[in-house]
Amino acid sequence: MSMREALERAMGREADDETMNRLKAGGVAMVSEDTMSKAIHDVYCGIMADHTHPNDKDREQARAMIAALQQQTA
């Protein structure tokens, strides 16, 4: 299930592009392990990385970051 689908389900309605843009403008980021690991790879590994795609360490960091964010917003 995509993040958008999860949001639509949680809201009980279909999220239109305007709603998604307002959430994004308000600082809301919707992430999954895949998108978070790609972001971690881009930020922390950067262009000098010895690998071109997120690796197991990036995914582990993504899971930890998502768990920490969920705990803070609980």
Image (cartoon, grey):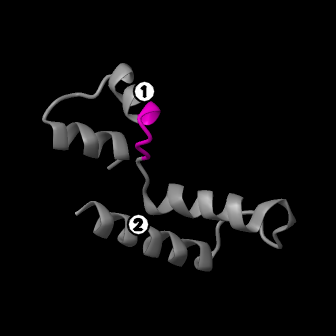
Q: Please, what secondary structure does the residue beneath circle 1 have? A: helix
Q: Please, what secondary structure does the residue beneath circle 2 have? A: helix
Locate residue 8 relative to residue 28 in the image: left or right: left
Residue at the outermost left position: 12
Residue linked to disc 2: 66
N-term mark: 1 or 2: 1
Locate residue 59 relative to residue 52 in the image: left or right: left
Where residue 10 appears, as percent x and y from the top left, is 18, 44
Where residue 8 appears, as percent x and y from the top left, is 23, 37
Locate residue 35 relative to residue 71 in the image: left or right: right
Give residue 19's quadrant in the image: top left
* Callout 1 amino acid: Asn
Residue beneath the point at 36% across and 71% down: 67
Residue linked to disc 1: 21
Where residue 13 appears, as percent x and y from the top left, is 16, 30
| Mark 2 Cα-neighbour bin, 10 Å: few <14, some 14–19, many ≥20 | some
